[in-house]
Image: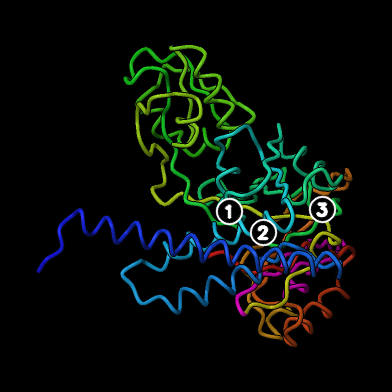
């Protein structure tokens, strides 16, 4: 006999009760783990452990739940349990509703203490000063390239990178009205304006484009004037009570932004090798013929792949440059260690910015 809707709902209610009991049992164990970590002085948050648990759960999944949905559920479970062990304060470019906030929630889960900041500089300051345990900053966009300010701040900051988040970025045109008519000003972060310049030129050629400190700040400004619009996320639309006048207006349909998770080394040392890691470093070389070529030789010799190579002015007035390099692998691997050792000997300046598991 096929069960009716009322019977199925009774089953779901019973299962929810069982699930809640099991989750609370898990939380009680997590509290005991927190006490041990407190006594031993070990980090409360371990991104490698989170990744390991989620991977095991995904491998044990027999359906019908999709593995990516299982991962999302377990990340929130672990985030809630971690909050019982110790609060995790996370700084990001605010206000509420930014893609930086979305990246922070994707990495840490929702059970964090939010520390929205007015600028990327402030994210670094708050994290370095200890008013936030971790910071989340954008470092690269698939359309517009690197976020220069983040790279410049990483150079001299005491913080190091312990994780990354790759976020699909969909920009929407938001305003108090539902139509695209009579828009005089469009607010957004300069990166977002650049990522949508083709659409804006075609559909709103007369509208003035004004830079905001963040997309969410642009959305807040748009909520104060019906002739203003913003380029921002669905989350910002909800946050500031705006209509979506146009969906997904970014010029690249597969627009992604990569965010770095940073902290002080005493908060969390470099994670151990996960088997799928990235090592980021910044170097400079003597101003000699072939010097840039020479620093690539150790990578080829030891079979280490380079996934990113960016130059930034050293601001010394001498036309010197720093080179930001991402390598596949972990320094604990012999071939990576050998390549880094040889590379360091060739550099006038050498610093490892972080070693961390790569984002899917």
Q: Which residue is drawn at 41% across and 15% down?
A: 183
Instruction: Report, in whole angstroms, how far the alpha carbon at label 2 lies from the one at label 3.
Output: 31 Å
Work out whether mark 1 precedes mark 2 in sequence or the reverse, and give the earlier one. 2
Describe residue 96's horizontal placement relative to residue 263 as left or right.
Answer: left
Badge 3, how many Cα within 10 Å: few under 14, some, many 20+? some
Residue appearing at x 88%, y 47% in the figure = 318
Q: How packed is label 1: few (under 14 Cα within 10 Å), some, or many (20 or more)? A: many
- Residue picked out by circle 1: 109
Mark 1 or mark 2: which is in front?
Answer: 2
Magenta residue span: 275-296
Q: Are marks 1 and 3 in contact (CB under 8 Å)?
A: no
Which residue position is annotated with label 2?
Answer: 82
Find residue 168 and name its label: none
Q: Nearer the viewer, residue 355 or 300?
A: 355
Query: What is the crowding at mark 2: few (fewer than 14 residues within 10 Å), some, or many (at least 20)?
Result: many
Badge nearest the viewer, 2 or 3: 2
Q: Which of marks 1 and 3 is nearer the N terminus?
A: 1
* 1 and 2 marks in contact (CB < 8 Å): yes
Give the residue number, with chain letter if any, for mark 3. Answer: 155
Q: Residue at x 50, y 32 (%)?
A: 236
Per the model, the C-alpha gap separating discs 1 and 2 is 10 Å
Question: Does 170 lie within the magenta span?
Answer: no
Q: Residue at x 59, y 70 (%)?
A: 51
Screen quadrant of the N terminus: bottom left
Tell me the element at label 1.
Answer: loop
């Amino acid at each position: 006999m096929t069960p009716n809707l009322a019977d199925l709902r009774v089953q779901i209610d019973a299962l929810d009760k069982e699930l809640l009991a099991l989750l609370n049992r898990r939380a009680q164990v997590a509290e005991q783990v927190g006490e041990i970590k407190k006594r031993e002085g070990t980090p409360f948050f371990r991104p490698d452990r989170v990744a390991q648990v989620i991977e095991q759960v995904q491998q044990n999944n027999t359906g019908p739940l999709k593995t990516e949905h299982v991962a999302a559920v377990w990340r929130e479970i672990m985030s809630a349990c971690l909050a019982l062990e110790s609060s995790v304060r996370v700084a990001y470019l605010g206000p509420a509703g930014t893609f930086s906030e979305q990246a922070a929630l994707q990495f840490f889960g929702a059970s964090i203490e939010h520390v929205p900041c007015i600028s990327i500089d402030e994210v670094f300051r708050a994290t370095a000063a200890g008013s936030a345990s971790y910071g989340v900053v954008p470092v690269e966009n698939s359309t517009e390239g690197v976020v220069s300010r983040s790279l410049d701040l990483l150079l001299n900051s005491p913080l190091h990178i312990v994780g990354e988040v790759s976020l699909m970025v969909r920009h929407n045109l938001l305003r108090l009205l539902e139509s695209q008519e009579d828009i005089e000003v469009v607010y957004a972060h300069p990166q977002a304006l650049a990522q949508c310049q083709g659409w804006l030129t075609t559909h709103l050629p007369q509208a003035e484009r004004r830079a905001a400190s963040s997309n969410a700040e642009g959305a807040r400004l748009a909520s104060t004037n019906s002739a203003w619009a913003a380029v921002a996320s669905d989350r910002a639309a909800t946050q500031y009570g705006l209509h979506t006048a146009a969906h997904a207006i970014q010029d690249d349909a597969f627009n992604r932004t990569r965010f770095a998770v940073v902290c002080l080394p005493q908060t969390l040392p470099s994670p151990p090798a996960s088997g799928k890691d990235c090592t980021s470093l910044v170097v400079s070389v003597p101003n000699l013929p072939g010097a840039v070529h020479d620093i690539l030789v150790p990578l080829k010799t030891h079979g280490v792949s380079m996934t990113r190579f960016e130059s930034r002015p050293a601001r010394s007035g001498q036309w010197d440059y720093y080179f930001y390099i991402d390598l596949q692998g972990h320094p604990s691997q012999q071939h990576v260690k050998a390549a880094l050792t040889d590379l360091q000997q060739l550099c006038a300046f050498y610093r490892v910015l972080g070693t961390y598991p790569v984002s899917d």
